[in-house]
Image (cartoon, coloured by chain):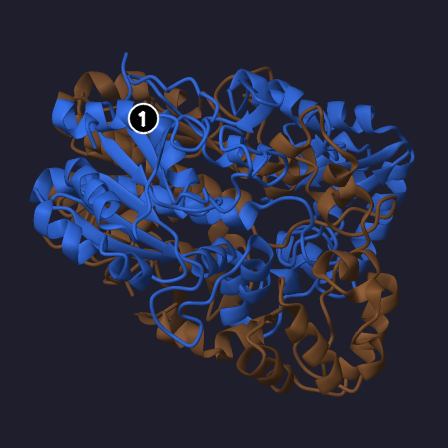
Chain colours: A brown, B blue
Amino acid sequence: MVSVFEGLRVLDVSQGVPGAFCAMQMGDLGANVIKVEPLQGDWLRQIGPFVKGESALFLQLNRNKRGIAVDLKKPEGTGVALKLAGVADVVIEAYRPGVMDRLSLGYDALEKVNPRLVYCSVSGLGPQGPLAQQPATEIIIQGIMGFYRGLGVLGEPPIREGADQASIGAGINAIQGIAAALYGRERTGQGQKVDVSLLGYVSSTYNLTYVRESPPANVAAFASYTDPPDYGYQTRDIPMLFTFQRDAEAWRKFVKAIGLEHIANDPRFADERKRRENRQILDPMLEEVFLTRTYEDLRKIIQDELGGTIVPMHSYDSLFAHGQVKAMDVVKEMEHPTVGTFKTLNVPWDFQDTPASLRLPPPLLGQHTREILTEAGLLSHEVEELFRKGLVKETVP
Amino acid sequence: MEGILKGIRVIDFGNATVGPYAPTLMAYLGADVIKIESPEGDSIRYVNGGDPNDTSTYGRNMIANSNTKRFIALNLKEDRDRKIALDLAAKADIIVENFRSADVMDRLGVGYDVVSKINPRIIFLSGSAYGNSGPWKGMGSTDGYSRAASGSTSINGAPGGQGEMLRGIANVDFTAAHINAAAILMALYAREKTGRGQKIYTSQWQSYVVAQTTRIAEYFATGKEPERLGTARPNIVPDQAFPTRDGYINASVIHDGLWPKFCRAIGREELIEDSRFETNQLRVQHRDQLIPLLERVFSGRPSAEWLFRLSQAGVPNGPCLDFMGTTEHPQIRANKYALEIDSQWGLAKISAYPWRFSKNSLEIPTPPSGLDAHRQEILSDWLGAKGAAG
């Protein structure tokens, strides 16, 4: 065995982001993943920006999968999907509750023909509760969870966290749940249903916030509502954050090194806490100097000479030029039949014995339809019949 | 029904969130989790309450990060305590640590090389801030610093404004902990096939880079820095907050099938046929004409009415809620995404289960305890009567 999910058959019936992300990570770790799309394709394929006609988001979320396009609105089409699910180890879906049941692909139906199946459903708001039927996207979840209280100025228009972290996070919860269920299956021989959601993921990241604001909370716990935005310190190039933590001597040396000797012994700035309290006075003085220096100049002083901590508030240009990205193998390249060479983010895990591998580019719509149908046991005339009736589609590179 | 990880033993050598919260998630799944702290305690043991002079206490942060575990304190620099740690490691299935670099555990004599010799089935996760190589190897970090270094602050901001830090929500820490939990669970499954454990490296910084997958995909395709757009999204329109007569709501026309429904729900059917807005691509192109128009429409009525109309039409929508009361939201309660536990600080709200399993149960969380509170119990349970003498 060379990777975690080697030998497993995974059916990705989802559209959009979270299910695709989960299925892709399983493919990265060796699974045989089949993406089942409707004839018009995953709606994510319609979302730009486009690279030679291909959606950049679809490209980023669907490598290491083969693709089949099938008319799920017709019983013969869902029959094909059912055949594939019957021999699958894992099914991943992200439709609204009830949709998969109506397609005869719900867990209850599939469990009967495939009791070893691990079936993962990703929803917006969770499988239980009065709003379980409601669709929900990233911004909806951020709104319910009050993300905007951590950004911008109270009373002004809200701001979202730019990362689609609820969507990606739900995909991480999905792979956790699937891995746990597969582990359980090794012991019991049985599969099961796993439910995860965007809301569940985000709630999980609010842990410290919930605790701090439980009674008897203190005023500091609510600072995130009323504190001004923190833009970091602007420099001549990359904005940054820095700290000397408890090293008072390093702070004094620093202000002298940047020409601010007169505040070296100012009690208002003597330690981290006081510097934070008095930042309205201190920060403009610091920034006036910082704007004349590059990030690298300041890093040499703060980190190399004085042993403090400094980090850049990276833009994407500066992030992907930074040596840590190369050292940690964060970005890989792949070849795609129509796009050519494209960049893709590597997995966030470095397993020493069961590593990830990037083998297949994302599929064109139905790129492997014939291959997949033949593997599923259909005879050649049955395959052609499905094509003739327009129940399946293929795109050849 | 029992816990899916019943019988699995986990050692938490971690500090703060990135290390310790992954074992907490394993505890929810039914694992037996012990936390080995230094005699000074977890770096956040006394943060936000708790008294370093009274080791039976703990601050509020521990409630979030280290609930549902048992506690033992060992000084790994002392031979006797290191031996106990190795004896415990010999019985463990999973070890999690988040020191600045994986070298720390090696220098302490409890690294993967040593442990795997006595326990080849050990799954050993090192989750440092920046990873096991590169110019930032060995650098310490916090949620905020890794957040900045990951590029994510550059994509949050008001239109035309600067990139800003997210306040008050440590989601970078918890994302890293979730990445760690996923890695452990996958290695546990793999071990069923191979019979062996393995070493795994992750980093908090890279975890949050991957959280930005969609924005980074856009950057890779265009070579252009993502724009800061308030609540809007670069490539789907409309997908953002709108001002109403009494606040803000969010609406999401995530694909073209929803556009006609959206137009009818807001009483502007004529927009369906408007050639400027027929497809998402066109709406993105003509954003500057469409959004002000929609803002005027939404400003005319209260939030509750819009939420109702959009829900009737099947268009994703939701309120911009004041944070307080989130744990009371009916979806959070019904799905047990947050729970209350009793603690030295009274009832505290914590995050609970992000998953539900049809055939396995989830553990009821228990509060943290004092430093070394379960020493005898742990030594007796894991090492037998002989171990309890240690």
User: What is the three-letter code of the residue carrying label 1?
Assistant: Pro
Instruction: Please tell me in which quadrant of the rendered image residue B81 appears.
Output: top left
Image location of residue A242, percent across then percent down: 64, 69
Give the secondary structure at mark 1.
Answer: helix
* Residue in front for this viewpoint, A216 or A67: A216
Q: Residue at x 54, y 60 (%)?
A: B146
Q: Residue at x 57, y 30 (%)?
A: A135
* Residue in front for this viewpoint, A330 or A44: A330
A233 relative position to A88: left or right: right
Image location of residue A271, percent across then percent down: 72, 62
Image location of residue A97, percent across then percent down: 47, 23
On the image, numbered disc 1 is attached to which residue? A75
B164 shown above or below B252: below
The chain identifier of the residue carrying mark 1 reads: A
A281 shown above or below A306: above
**Residue A36 visible in the displayed image:** no
